[in-house]
Amino acid sequence: MINRDTFSSYHPLINFLYFGLVFAFSMIFTHPVCLGMSLCCAFAYSFNLNGRKALRFNLIYMLPLFFVSALINPAFSHEGATILTYLPSGNPLTLESITYGISAAAMLIAVIIWFSCYNAVMTSDKFVYLFGRLIPSLSLILSMTLRLVPKFKAQIKVISDAQKCVGRDASNGGLLMRAKNGLTILSIMVTWALENAIETADSMKSRGYGLPGRTAFSIYIFDSRDRAALVFIAVCGAYITAGALLGGLKWRYYPTMKGVALGPFSASLFACYFALCIMPVVLNVREERKWNALRFAA
């Protein structure tokens, strides 16, 4: 669990429902205001979770990916009524294609950052707790798959550091020697993975996995705090969904950009959507202030 992240301490059902709604809304709503709020809130929560590490990740990887993704659409799509200029190939460069490229890039980056937050909050034990009884085999496979990449990444770093101590790292020697050392590290990694798989299978068997009537221990309790969060998420999700179905978040990019006029109804939808996206950050800030007040009072 992430240190001092209040939202991570909520019931797994609350975490899963929240991220499910955020993922769905971020991919469905193409209104620029919704995309901007989703991206900004995702960035704020990722920074709230991982601090400078998240900031470095977003600046080094997400920002270049955003610009590359934004340039792809106007480079290949030339639809739109507002022609800004003509490319050397003779194709028009339109305002609509540029705007759509930026919105598509914002959607992609927002979903990636939200997924990084999901991966930090929804641990494998939470996933197994939610779906272990409904789909036990599938939930186990998914939870094991999600932890393979970080686990293997950490182990291969351990192996590489050990090989570096004896001068056999992939960065030592010439090209042929580096390739040979890399294959050695890969061979050690595969051997470790196979041995780990056997140990995992033996451990599961010794714990009675798959036997009928087997119970599972869990530390999660659905309390009043979780009920309040569930009501908030359900109300916001239902209101935003109903508003979107009524056209309150309608927006188009082609042939000209046009959307619903800003009014009390659309403004309330934007406010509700922002409240839903920023919810984990608000919980963390409120808990931090409460903790500081109690600490100074003592």
Image: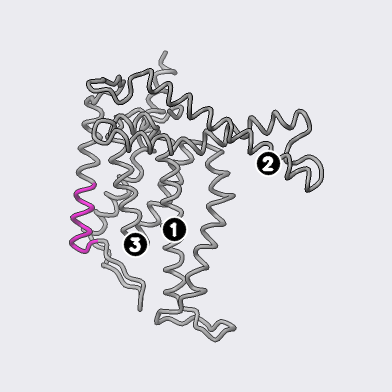
Badge 1 is on which residue? 106
* 201 relative to 75 in the view: left or right: left
Q: Nearer the viewer, mark 3 or mark 2?
A: 2
Crowd rating for badge 1 (residues with CA inside 10 Å; few <14, some 14–19, many 20+): many
In the structure shown, which secondary structural element does the residue marked by tag 1 occupy? Answer: helix
Q: Residue at x 29, y 50 (%)?
A: 273
Q: Give the mark nearest the N terminus, 2 or 1.
A: 1
The stretch of residues the image draws in magenta is 237-248
Q: Nearer the viewer, mark 2 or mark 1?
A: 2
Marker disc for residue 183: 2
Identify the amino acid type marked 3: Thr
Identify the amino acid type marked 2: Leu
Q: Position of residue 94 (x, y in %)?
A: 46, 78
Does residue 269 lie above or below 193 as drawn?
Answer: below
Q: Position of residue 112 (x, y in %)?
A: 45, 49
Q: Quadrant of residue 242?
A: bottom left
Quadrant showing the C terminus: top left
The span from disc 1 to disc 3 (Cα, nearest Å) is 10 Å
* 288 relative to 158 in the view: left or right: left
Q: Residue at x 48, y 30 (%)?
A: 197
Does residue 89 lie above or below 249 as drawn?
Answer: below
Badge 3 is on which residue? 30
Q: Residue at x 60, y 34 (%)?
A: 189
Q: Position of residue 24 (x, y in %)?
A: 31, 52
Does residue 92 lie above or below 50 as drawn?
Answer: below
Q: Quadrant of residue 218?
A: top left
Identify the amino acid type marked 1: Ala
Q: Nearer the viewer, residue 116 or 37?
A: 116
